[in-house]
Every structure is written in structure tokens, then in C-alpha cells.
Amino acid sequence: MELIEIRVLDRVGENISFKDSKAVYTYCINMPLKMDTLAQEHLYCFCLNSKNEVITVELISKGSLTGSICHPREIFKAAIISNSASIVLAHNHPSGNIDPSVDDIGVTKRIHEVSKLIGINFLDHIIIGKGEWFSFKKDGLF
């Protein structure tokens, strides 16, 4: 598995805001991401301002068919650099199965704990499948 250096994918400004997990899913399956069509797992961090408007979208890691490597420091580095009030994570499962893996659950719990320590709200973690999505917050795993 290969770790990709954090880079700005898109500076979207104040025109996109996320009101719920469906809005995140809709953004993720449309241009420029098209996460539901990717053959490898990609993990993105959406850095948001205090109105939940997207400041930047950062590619945190690109993995294999079945996984990717992620550490809280890469996620929060993106959030701190963009002066974010909150973040949302999204990654795809190329298999189309949206059930979170044991690793997905563990990483999400670690990110949630770190977010409390540094004062950047972690709003949700979304898994993108084929035509559907899973929300950790909506499904009570936060």
C-alpha cells in the first residue's frame, strides 16, 4: 500500500456545504472524485469552516483493492493547514460492500478521540459503495 502526500485536490470555496451524509455521498460520486468508480481505496478529508462549507478536499491516502493506510496526523495536518472548524472523512470500498471493516471502525474511533483533544470537530466518516453509502454517525458508531 502506498501513502500519498497530502495535497489540495480542490479549493471549492464557500459554494458547497454539507448538511448531512447524503450531501457528502452525492459530492463523492460526482466530479471530480467519482469515488464509486475507483478500483483502489481512496481516503479523502473534507475540511470545513464553521458553517460546514467546504474549504478544501484533501487526498489523505490511496490504497489497494481492500485497504489503505491512514494515521490521524495526516488527517489533522490537512485540517490545521486549512484552518478548519471541522472535518468529514470519506473513503470508498471498491467491492461495493459498504459494511465497515474492523480497521475502519478502529481508525474512526482514533480520529474521534484525537478530534476531541485538538478541538476540531469530526462530524462523520462515510463509506462509499456502489449506489449506496454508510455513515458512522448516522448508524451510531461515533
Image (tube, helix red, strand yellow):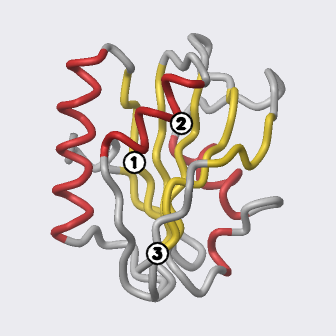
Residue 25, x across and y down, in percent: 60, 54
Q: Is residue 103 left or right of residue 26?
A: left
Q: Please, what is the three-letter code of the amino acid marked with disc 2?
A: Asp
- Mark nearest the camera among 1 and 2 is 1
Label 2 CA crowd tier, 10 Å (few <14, some 14–19, many 20+): some
Numbered disc 1: secondary structure:
strand
Q: Residue at x 40, y 60 (%)?
A: 134
Residue at 20% in and 67% down: 103
Q: What's the distance in space between the residues labelled 2 and 3, CA to CA?
A: 31 Å
Residue behind mark 2: 20
* Separation (CA) of disc 1 from disc 3: 21 Å
**Marking on residue 125:** 1
CA distance separating discs 1 and 2:
11 Å
Q: x, y percentage for residue 120? A: 38, 19
Q: Quadrant of the C terminus?
A: top left
Residues at circles 1 and 3 in contact by the CB criterion of under 8 Å: no
Give residue 119's position: percent from left, percent from top: 32, 14
Query: Which quarter of the figure is the N terminus placed in?
Result: bottom left
* Quarter of image, res 82: top right
Task: Judge by depth and name the residue closer to the eye, 133 or 109.
Answer: 109
Kindly identify which numbered label has been placed on residue 2: 3
